[in-house]
Image (tube, grey):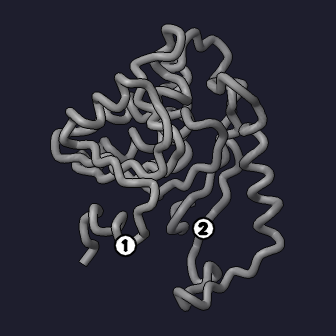
Amino acid sequence: IREAEVALVGIPYDGAVTYRSGARKGPQAAREASDSIESYCPKLQRDMEDHRFVDCGDLDIERAVQGSSSGQELVTKLEEQLTSMAATTPVIGIGGDHLVAYPLIHRVLQKYPNLHILHIDAHADLRKDWEGEPFNHATVMGRVLDAMGPDSKLIQWGIRSGLREEFDLIRNDPRITLLQRSSTLEDVLSHLPSSQ
């Protein structure tokens, strides 16, 4: 893992969904689908084979869930597993329901407190809680916002629905930018800091 530029890790969890399960099958499905695609991108003129990455397998969801009485305990256990798996290597997580993004983003925010996040979704996911649980698929960006510093940005694209309170938060928190669903990729990129 130390020689790898990026570590891939599966997070096959969908215990925070409120409508339909199945997202836990995502990591394995993504791996199976990747077997039938070429590694070279002619548009970018880049080949994945030129990079060193490692698939670390899946986090131990059963161990994380066992004894967890809240979503916060669950994400804390997932964060501990991520830290022990790849302390310095950048990690790409494959989920899983929306909640699995939290330990990954929280880990990055600890190193980069001024992080800009592009959230592409149909829902804002900024609720304070879901039936009393603050860590849920419908609250995950709210918890990310709680962890963000004053100079961080949350750019949301594709949002079509949410609670009144979520849209009030979007209007009143200067860290949040809500893009029109019809925005182009160029519009989106204009809100992100230049890497040059």
Q: In which quarter of the image is residue 105?
A: top left
Amino acid at circle 1:
Glu
Residue pictured at 62% horizontal, 85% vertical: 41
Report the quarter where the C terminus lies. bottom left
Label 1 with label 2: CB-CB less than 8 Å: no
Indicate whether 9 appears above or below 144. Answer: below
Left/right placement of residue 192 relative to residue 137 reads left
Residue pictured at 76% horizontal, 67% vertical: 34
On the image, the x and y values in percent for residue 168 come to 29, 28
Q: Which of 24 and 168 is in front in this view?
A: 168
Residue pictured at 44% horizontal, 49% vertical: 119
User: Please, what secondary structure does the residue beneath circle 2 have?
Assistant: strand
The residue tagged 1 is 186
- Pointer 2 local density, CA inside 10 Å: few below 14, some 14–19, many at least 20: some
The residue tagged 2 is 53
Query: Alpha carbon of mark 1 to alpha carbon of mark 2: how far?
Result: 29 Å
Which label sits in the foreground, 1 or 2?
1
Q: Quadrant of residue 148?
A: top left
On the image, the x and y values in percent for residue 104 come to 47, 43
Indicate whether 110 appears above or below 63. Answer: below
On the image, the x and y values in percent for residue 151 come to 17, 46
Q: Nearer the viewer, residue 12 or 144?
A: 144
User: Please, what secondary structure does the residue beneath circle 1 have?
Assistant: helix
The answer to whether residue 193 of the structure is visible from this angle is: yes
- Pointer 1 local density, CA inside 10 Å: few below 14, some 14–19, many at least 20: few
Residue pictured at 28% horizontal, 73% vertical: 195
Q: Which of 28 and 111 is in front in this view?
A: 28
Report the quarter where the N terminus lies. bottom right
Q: How many labels does the image show?
A: 2
Amino acid at circle 2:
Phe
Q: Nearer the viewer, residue 13 or 77?
A: 13
